[in-house]
Image (cartoon, rainbow, N blue to C red):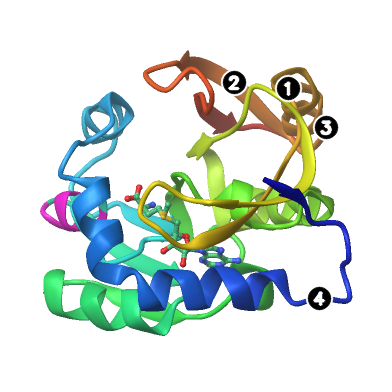
Amino acid sequence: MKPALDYTLDYKRLVAEGYNTYADAYQQARGNGLPAAIKWLKNRLPNRARVLDIGCAAGVPVTRELSKRFVVTGVDISAEQIRRARQNVRHGEFFHSDILALDFSTDAFDAVVALYVLYHIPRGEHERLFRSIHRWLTPGGYLLVTLAREAEEGRLERASFGAEMFWSHYSLPEYRVLLTETGFEILELHEENPRYPLAICRRGQA
Ligand SMILES: C[S@@+](CC[C@H](N)C(=O)[O-])C[C@H]1O[C@@H](n2cnc3c(N)ncnc32)[C@H](O)[C@@H]1O
């Protein structure tokens, strides 16, 4: 593990190249487990609800599962992951992009899912991302987001699937403040992965 605090270096490129090069290994390590929060979402949204999946990777299992009932949009910074997502998920629209470089219209989505992705984005950008998601979501819309328990300004560490990865995140108490300030109410916290808890949030007023 090494500190990664030189922001003249392109950590996003390192992340994208890691998910490009280690796509098979990542898929194998990821497996097919669906977080309970996805079932939670499916029980709450009507058919044809609009769902954005940020960091959708190859679209399996999460985006594909969502696409069975909802109109899905997937975004991923890795070209190889998006190529696979387009193959794996027949009904969906996919964008190869850094999520911070994209914009959607106001009220474009009924839910936004961001599983295991925030921690690959420099944490100084998390507030801007939450504010964008708030604008993209319809009032009362849901955000499912993987957070972190401990704070980490920036580090480089090899992921379980083999690629050297960049990690950056706030602590859980800091995320509670940030989510409240950016207009979200945390409804539930799922701790299937205690190191990286998943928050189910509802969009309120900013
Ligand atoms: C650990 S995978 C999570 C995949 C999927 N959400 C899941 O639960 O299986 C993280 C994904 O986020 C993508 N990613 C990382 N930084 C990103 C960014 N700034 N914008 C969009 N996607 C990003 C990576 O390329 C990778 O495919």
- Percent of width and height locating residue 89: 15, 69
Q: Dot 1, crowdedness within 10 Å: few (<14), some or many (≥20)?
A: some
Mark 4 vs mark 3, CA separation in Å: 30 Å
| Tag 3 residue | 181
Q: Which mark is residue 35?
A: none
Q: Main secondary structure of the magenta part?
A: helix
* Nearest to N terminus: mark 2 or mark 4: 4
Q: Which residue is mark 2?
A: 186
Q: Secondary structure at mark 4?
A: loop
Pointer 4 residue: 9
Query: What residue does disc 1 label?
Result: 176
Q: Earlier in the sequence, mark 4 or mark 1?
A: 4
Amino acid at pointer 4: Leu
Local SS, label 1: helix
Q: Which mark is first along the chain, 2 or 3?
A: 3
Q: Position of residue 54 (x, y in %)?
A: 47, 59
Residue mark closest to the camera, 4 vs 3: 4
Q: Is residue 37 visible?
A: yes
* N-term-proximal mark, 1 vs 3: 1
Q: Is residue 64 magenta?
A: yes
Q: Is residue 79 left or right of residue 183?
A: left
Residue shown at the point (47%, 50%) measured from the top left: 159
Residue 77 is at least partly visible in this image: no
Rounded to the nearest whole Å, what is the CA distance between mark 4 and mark 1?
Answer: 29 Å
Q: In the image, residue 35 lies at what x, y percent?
A: 28, 31
Q: Residue at x 65, y 71 (%)?
A: 12
**Magenta segment boundaries in residue numbering:** 63-68
Residue 51 image position (x, y, % from top left): 36, 55
Q: CA distance from mark 1 to mark 3?
A: 9 Å
Q: CA distance from mark 3 to mark 2?
A: 12 Å
Label 3 SS: helix
